[in-house]
Image: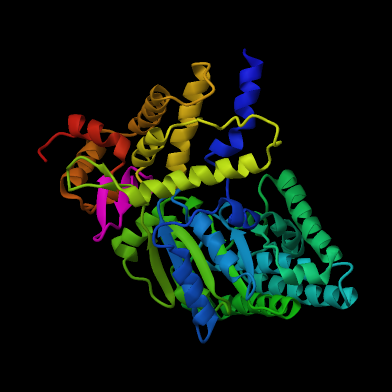
Amino acid sequence: MDLELLRWWKRLSPVFDPWRELGPSDMERLYQDRPGRPSLPIAEEIFTADDPAEVKVVLCGSRGSGKSTELRRIGWELRHHFVPVLLDAGPAFPRGGGPLPLVILIGLAVLAEARRWSGPGADGAEHHEQAEKKLVERLREAVQKFAPKADVVGEMVKAAGALITSYPDPKVQAVGAAVQAVGGAVAAAGRAAKDRAGSPVGLEGLGRAELTALIPPERMGDARAVVEAVNDAVERLAKLSGRPALLLVEGIDKMGELADVFRVFQQPEILDAVRAPMVFTAPVSLRHSVQASWMPGKLRQVILPNVPVVRSAKGGEARPDPEGVAFMEGVFRRRVEAFRADLDPAEADPLDGIVADADLERLAVASSGVVREFLLLLWESRKAALAARRRAITPEDVTEGIRRRRIALQYALDDQRLAVLRRILARGTRPEGDVAEELLFHNYVACYGNGDLTFRPHEILVDYVRRFGGGEE
């Protein structure tokens, strides 16, 4: 092994890592404004609403398209006026669960966030501790009507620190370093719980009971009691922080198949009753599902189309779209600039000439407008350069990186799926049926918002679909 070359590329991994998530502290250095700035209208709607708690938004987009980044950006834009509680519900959510388990997770997350504001060192710490115990007990009593092991709710509040991401803000800084330390302690407790249990805070610990079922009409009163206990926690957080809570929930698209996702948003009166503005992320196939083409209650769907990296007529050759390509290139260049900012001024820049502009454009088009796909293709191109013992990515490495990714996608394509992709390529529309829904859910189909809503197979599969999809265009 060439250890020097391996160390050289390893040092550059943060620039290429497709799984690197942007936290609140990364927003200034790494966030790239997306065409249309989709997070801004949602933030403005929440800020200008007569009653922000009435705003409930489901942001639908392809997996890896940047939904979580836009969700974090909403919190960043509003952090001086609200307390963002960013919850990753996916790891802890029970398979087949409806809205009630989600509300319970939200309650645990809000209580964990409140600990940042009321821990040791804060004014009236003993009073805060007693107030928290009352809130935990109320939530436990309400949850116990649905779950046989609700006595563990108190421990789950501690573990919920691993599910939330806290935003730095002037209010926390003003309270002092002691409260900042509490936030770190809560997160550390959550990480320890995760290490012990294998997940940060699995609701299976409550016992499955009725948490995986929709609530029958005769039990709605009990469900409302759970919501009211959560609302008490939301109100407590607002009093501690001096600002209302803003609930940001991601991870729903990791809960299973589309039917599992849709179940979360059934019985909307449960989520509607939570007294805080809420923004969820969900897969794009939810927005295009006939069964979810409308949502009852206050829930409003907003689509996050793929970045428009191509312009094409149906069935035609893709042409790069300058605005979309520039955005993808900007995502990469933000990472490059952040890396360079930490270099010793006397050190040679290892990223100088690392990849040509023309190759970034190829990768942007090949990504079908999915940010993580663009970064995955860069990652595969980097691996190809390493295999060839190079310190820069060449056009040949880009070709090889695209080939590797294309083959990984081709494994799942049988005749039926290829025929559906061929039809989508020819017409630019999405046919009904489970196969089309599955292909959209798993990013085999791109959804663009170039004027009209149009669909196209993943760009790196287009030639393959033409050759093996059968039929006529």
* Image location (x, y in percent) of residue 306: 36, 52
Q: Which residues are magenta?
A: 438-456
Task: Find out whether residue 472 is within the magenta segment.
Answer: no
420 horizontally vs 61: left or right: left
The residue at the far top in this view is 1
84 horizontally vs 470: left or right: right
Q: Is residue 469 above or below residue 146?
A: above
Q: Is residue 75 above or below residue 82?
A: above
Q: Is residue 380 above or below residue 431?
A: above
Which one is in front, 64 or 345?
A: 345
* Quarter where residue 416 is shown: top left
414 horizontally vs 121: left or right: left
In the rendered image, is residue 220 in sight?
yes
Tag count: 0
Residue at 43% of width from left, 40% of height from top?
A: 374
Which one is in front, 101 or 251?
A: 251
Specify the quadrant that holds the C terminus: top left
Residue at 62% of width from left, 67% of height from top?
A: 106
435 horizontally vs 36: left or right: left
Residue at 58% of width from left, 66% of height from top?
A: 75
Residue at 78% of width from left, 77% of height from top?
A: 134
* Image location (x, y in percent) of residue 195: 73, 44
